[in-house]
Image (cartoon, helix red, strand yellow):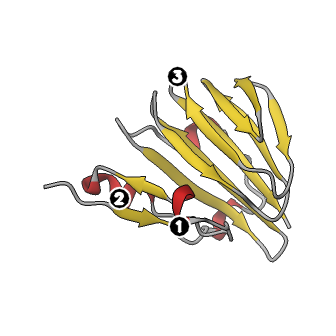
Amino acid sequence: MLIRRYIYLVYPVYFSPSLITILENHDKLDSFIIGEPKMDYINKVMDLDKEISYSPGSIVSKIIYKTDHTILTLFALDKDQSIAEHITPFEAMVQVIDGEAELVIGEEIKLVKVGESIIMPATVPHALFARKAFKMLLTMMK
């Protein structure tokens, strides 16, 4: 039986009905829900690639730092997974840790790969498609 569930990311994201992320595989839901960050990341040297693992056919996310002004979230997307188009009210920086993905920002398509970064503008629709298994650190800047 196919169950559709709507997922809202922890940080404020403004969705219209056509932009809501819908998960087709309800058994993967727990791997997508974002929990509260662990404060044991403060003053710790990290290998970001090892801080998050891939899950076949899924998107995994993990908040590693959160304040009123900044949220750092690690994402691991298996090959061919995507984050649906959405809009945020503030800038966000993507730092690629592994793999490569297509980012659609407004009308432009950007290919990003390991070692590269891009800052996405506020209030511009954006989406992501993992061409290969893909990990990133997303920095939301309020």
Disc 1 crowd rating (10 Å Cα; few below 14, some 14-19, many 20+) is some
Q: Is residue 38 above or below residue 47?
A: below
The residue at 73%/54% (across/down) is 44
Quarter of the N terminus within the rendering: bottom left
Task: Pinpoint residue 11: horizontal percent, then vertical percent.
Answer: 67, 68
Whichever of labels 3 and 1 marks the residue nearer the N terminus, that label is 1
Name the residue that disc number 3 marks. Answer: 132
- Mark 1 falls on what kind of element? loop
Q: Earlier in the sequence, mark 2 or mark 3?
A: 2
Type of amino acid under label 1? Tyr
Q: Classify the position of the C terminus by image quarter.
A: bottom right
**As drawn, 73 above or below 35:** above
Q: Position of residue 56 (x, y in %)?
A: 34, 35
Q: Name the residue under label 2.
A: 29
C-beta proximity under 8 Å, tags 2 and 3: no
Label annotation for residue 8: 1
Circle 3 — which element? loop
